[in-house]
C-alpha cells in the first residue's frame, strides 16, 4: 500500500477528494484515473459513507471545469488556437458544434485518454450555453463516480485486496512517473504557447 499512499495519501480524505477532482479538471494537472482510484478506494474503505465520495468528486470536478471553461471564454477562438494543436482544435470544434449536449455528456463520462480539458476549453471558447453544459457535465460525472463507488461498496474486500497488492503498487509507481512527466510537459507547452510572438503582438 506504500506506493498508493505516496501518490494519493494527501488526497485520501473528504476534502482531498474534492481537491483532486478540481485539479483533475484543470489545464496543468495530469494524473490519469487518479480521482477514480481515490473514489474507489475511499468508497471501499468507508463503506457506510460510500455515497459521499461521488458527490465530492463531482463537486470538485465541476469547480475545476468551471475554471477551465472560464479560461476558454477569455481566450476565445483566436486565443484557443495558441493553446491547442490546430488538428485537435478543429476536431473538437466540429464535434462541439455538430453534436452539442450529447458530446458534452460523453466527454464527462469517459475516462482518460479522452481529452476532457481541451474539450471544456473549446466549449468555453465557442460560447456554449453554460447552463446546459454544466448541468450535463455534473450529471455525467455523478453517474461515473457514483457507479465506481457503488461497485466499490459491493465488492469492497476484493477491491481493497487489489489496491493493496504488489502488482497494483507497480502500476501506481508507473502513474507517479506519468503524473510528473505529464504535468511538467503540460505546463511547459502551455507556457511556450502563451508566450508565443503571435500572442504578444495580438
Image (cartoon, grey):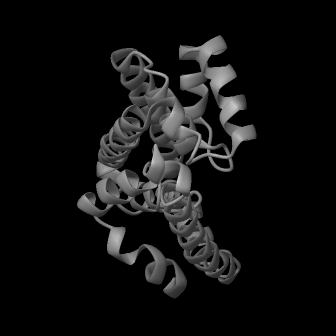
Look at the image and tell me whether residue 155 can be seen.
no
Q: Residue furthest left?
A: 15
> Horizontal and vertical percent for residue 48?
30, 51
| Foreground of the two, 21 or 86 | 86
- Specify whether residue 63 is in view: yes
Quarter of the image for residue 110 reads: top right
Residue drawn at 44 percent across, 48 percent down? 25
Q: Is residue 146 left or right of residue 63?
A: right
The residue at the point 64 percent across, 72 percent down is 178
Compared across the picture, whether 165 is left or right of 53 comes to right
Above/below status of 118 relative to 100: below
Residue 47 appears left or right of 98: left
Residue 126: x percent and y percent? Answer: 49, 23
Q: How many marks?
A: 0
Residue sticking out furthest to the bottom = 2
Name which quarter of the figure residue 174 lies in.
Answer: bottom right
User: In the displayed structure, would residue 198 be above or below residue 4?
Assistant: above
Residue toward you, 53 or 45: 53
Amino acid at each position: 500500500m506504500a506506493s498508493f499512499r505516496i501518490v494519493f495519501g494527501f488526497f485520501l480524505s473528504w476534502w482531498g477528494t474534492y481537491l483532486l477532482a478540481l485539479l483533475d479538471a484543470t489545464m496543468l494537472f495530469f494524473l490519469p484515473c487518479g480521482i477514480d482510484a481515490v473514489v474507489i478506494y475511499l468508497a471501499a474503505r468507508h463503506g457506510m459513507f460510500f455515497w459521499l465520495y461521488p458527490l465530492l468528486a463531482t463537486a470538485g470536478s465541476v469547480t475545476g471545469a468551471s475554471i477551465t471553461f472560464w479560461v476558454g471564454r477569455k481566450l476565445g477562438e483566436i486565443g484557443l488556437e495558441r493553446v491547442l494543436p490546430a488538428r485537435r482544435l478543429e476536431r473538437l470544434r466540429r464535434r462541439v458544434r455538430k453534436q452539442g449536449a450529447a458530446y458534452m455528456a460523453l466527454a464527462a463520462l469517459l475516462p482518460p485518454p479522452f481529452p476532457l480539458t481541451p474539450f471544456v476549453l473549446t466549449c468555453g471558447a465557442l460560447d456554449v450555453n453554460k447552463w446546459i453544459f454544466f448541468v450535463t457535465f455534473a450529471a455525467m460525472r455523478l453517474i461515473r463516480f457514483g457507479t465506481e463507488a457503488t461497485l466499490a461498496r459491493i465488492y469492497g474486500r476484493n477491491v481493497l485486496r487489489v489496491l493493496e497488492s504488489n502488482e497494483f503498487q507497480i502500476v501506481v509507481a508507473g502513474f507517479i512517473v506519468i503524473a510528473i512527466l505529464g504535468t511538467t510537459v503540460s505546463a511547459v507547452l502551455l507556457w511556450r504557447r502563451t508566450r508565443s510572438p503571435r500572442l504578444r503582438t495580438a
